[in-house]
Image: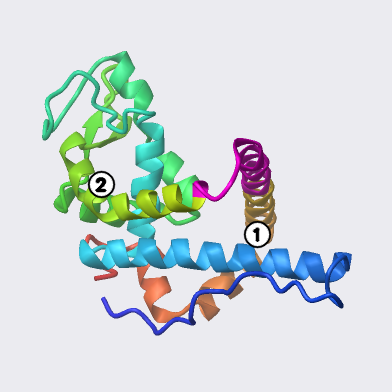
Amino acid sequence: MTLPQQHAPVPGPETSGEDRGDPQIERRELGRLLQGLASEMNLLGHDFAASQGLHATDVQALLAVMRGAGPGGSGTAGTEPGARSGTGPDVEAAAVTPGLLREELGITSGAVTAVLDRLERAGHVHRSRDSADRRQVRVHYNPGASRIATAWFTPVAERTDIVRADFTPAELRVVARFLGRMTEELAALRQERRTGAEARPDVRAEARTEAPAEARADVRPDAGPDAAG
């Protein structure tokens, strides 16, 4: 996977005497800094995907599965690393379904299947049938796969610790509250826009028509396991 050249990291905020205290400039500057942070996080995800032979959508799906697995990160509680299956209400409650992934990622059922096929081949997840309803598929994060992600993202955590050391606990609490609220509001906006698009088929059709070829390959209904590869 070849990634496009990206701009240099966004510099820190300007604090000239003329700009200081202007609400509009502060709003613009804050927005620019948030966009820079989001861009760098997105590029890290793209690089991880490229290192694993995956796609950006695959990484988003993997993160969703990991979140569904809870703090332990496995979704296969009580099994040994590398186990291919797990059963029981605790394990099933900790796993997500393809339907939930489809809703979160905003892609078709066929595209979800292609994503899960790639993640399963790469050893990151496995699927199982619900013990109460065999028609229901559950997606589990493989505990052994965490070593791959840990090796890649540990330096990110180390850089985070370096930055955290520059702030007091009180300042960090404010930052955490701000980022938490921003995440909530952006998630709400994303859901509102998706709901609006679903209510207007003409908008959805136009979006599909104008989407880049690579993106269309990853979301078409008849996508197979290697459709976007």
Dot 2: few (<14), some (14–19), or many (≥20) neighbours within 10 Å? Answer: few
Residue nearest the observer in this picture, 169 or 61: 169
Location of residue 64 (image quadrant): top left
Residue 100 location (% of width, % of height) = 45, 40
Residue 68 location (% of width, % of height) = 40, 33
Residue 17 seen: yes
Left or right of residue 214, residue 201 in this image: right
Give the colour scheme of this rendering: rainbow
Label 1: state its secondary structure.
Answer: helix
Determine the residue located farthest toward the bottom in the rendered image: 5
Type of amino acid under label 2: Thr
Residue pictured at 36% horizontal, 72% vertical: 217
**Residue 43 versus residue 198 in the image, above or below:** below
- Is residue 72 magenta-colored? no
2 and 1 marks in contact (CB < 8 Å): no
Type of amino acid under label 1: Ala
Dot 1: few (<14), some (14–19), or many (≥20) neighbours within 10 Å? Answer: some
Quadrant in the picture for the N terminus: bottom left
Q: Which residue is mark 1?
A: 197
Label 2: state its secondary structure.
Answer: helix
Quadrant in the picture for the C terminus: bottom left
- Is residue 177 magenta-colored? yes
Residue pictured at 45% horizontal, 80% vertical: 212
**Numbered disc total:** 2
Residue 228 location (% of width, % of height) = 29, 69
Query: In whole angstroms, how far apart are the C-alphas of marks 2 and 1?
Result: 37 Å
**Residue 171 versus residue 8 in the image, above or below:** above
Q: Which mark is residue 150?
A: 2
Q: Which residues are magenta?
A: 164-184
Residue pictured at 47% horizontal, 66% vertical: 40
Left or right of residue 95, residue 189 in this image: right
